[in-house]
Amino acid sequence: MDQFLNESGVKPSTPAGQDQVSTDIVVLNPQERMLVNRVFENLRVISPETMVGVATRIMDLERLSVSISRYPSMHQGGFTVGAPRNTETLVETLCTFGDHERLLTLPTKAILGKGFLVAKFHAFAAITKVALNSNFSDRDIQELRQATLNIMFTLMAEEVYMSILDDPNLNTDVRRDVAEALAELWEHRLDQHAISVAPVLDAVWSVRDQIAPNFGTMIGTSELLLITIALDETWQSFISQRLSNSDVGAALEEFLFGLSHEDISFIRNELKTRGISAVGRDEIPQILGHRAALSNEDPRIFYRAYTQRRNNADARKRLNAAGPRKTLEDHYMQYIFEQNRERQKNGK
């Protein structure tokens, strides 16, 4: 166990002496490794039996990653059914095929790797629960929660990238950038884009409890200032440059208030029918017959909310119905890729 935890984040998958980059799935990145080591040190004193159980979960992840990493790399050349297969053909496949056509064309490692991330999410969620029950420090619990959230966002990033690639109006260069980022995510099951946006989207998700929404106008200037004032410059520029886009505005409404565009429209029509200008959050269940998805306690609720919003957006595209055709996460991540491409173009 100690030997495993002292290893670096990426294990070489090539013979010793060859100067090649590892293509293995990364079990724990350096931050996660330090965090797990700290958990072990605490549990050695508090509950050695629990420590062994946690170590077993981590070793299970190691064994799973080794098995999946035996499949061909995203960057490995070869032939599939007589056709050449390499990074370029993978990117071309991602850029050419739609979401519902990709499954049987994707590399096996890409398909199995998603299961690894789900297993890793469950492992860290369980470790966080152990920390809570073992009276770990607030700092340790918060860092474990953030690590679990980052894993969830990495899992979600795969779906966000797929959604972005399905946009027929996406710039060709940006499309290739997204496809290459997706291929790299599949290679190691790490994604720096997802980790960088996780704190921002988590903060926006959490700040919803501080908003007293007016469901007549849904979003006011004060609420937007509250959301953006403490967040990074990228989010602020995204809001200032893209909020005028009706699809972005509608996607932000869905994200903030935990309601579908259809529910929001229904509420607005009800307000007009009743002759009132606003309604509070507590009154929404009586109008809709169900509650908004607003809990911040479990990352799985965030993921479920994203999935529901993405499915609704896909349905609107198919039916040519009113409402956002992308989720807020899709818009924000696409904006980041477009900004990166613009900086490259300008030599910055």
Image: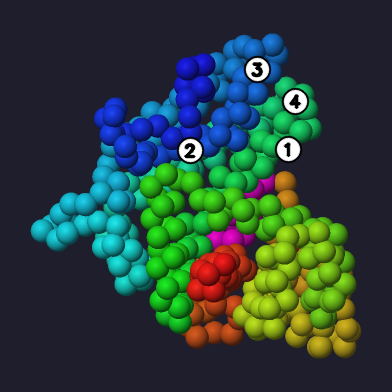
Residue 307, magenta (yes or no)? yes
Amino acid type assigned to the residue bearing label 2 in the image: Ala
Q: Which residue is mark 1?
A: 142
Q: Quadrant of the C terminus?
A: bottom right
Residue 308 seen in render: no
Secondary structure found at label 1: helix
- Lower position in the chain sequence, tag 1 or tag 4: 4
Q: Position of residue 173 (x, y in %)?
A: 42, 73
In this rendering, the label closer to the viewer, 4 or 2 = 4
- Lower position in the chain sequence, tag 4 or tag 2: 2
The part of the image, by quadrant, that contains residue 226 is: bottom right
Amino acid type assigned to the residue bearing label 3 in the image: Glu
In this picture, which residue range is highlighted in magenta? 298-308
Q: Residue furthest left?
A: 82
Residue 344, magenta (yes or no)? no
Q: Residue furthest front?
A: 347
- Lower position in the chain sequence, tag 4 or tag 3: 3
Label at residue 136: 4
Q: Residue at x 67, y 58 (%)?
A: 201
Q: Residue at x 15, y 54 (%)?
A: 79
In this rendering, the label closer to the viewer, 1 or 2 = 1
Q: Which residue is mark 2?
A: 119
Residue 201 seen in render: yes
Q: Residues within 10 Å of mark 3 (few under 14, many from 20)?
A: few
Q: Position of residue 267 (x, y in %)?
A: 76, 78
- Lower position in the chain sequence, tag 3 or tag 2: 3
Amino acid type assigned to the residue bearing label 4 in the image: Phe
Judging depth in this view, the residue of 55 and 315 nearest the camera is: 55
User: Is 312 drawn above or below residue 291 in the view shown?
Assistant: below
Q: Which residue is mark 3?
A: 41
- What is the magenta segment's predominant secondary structure? helix
Whole-angstrom CA distance, mark 3 to mark 2, is 23 Å
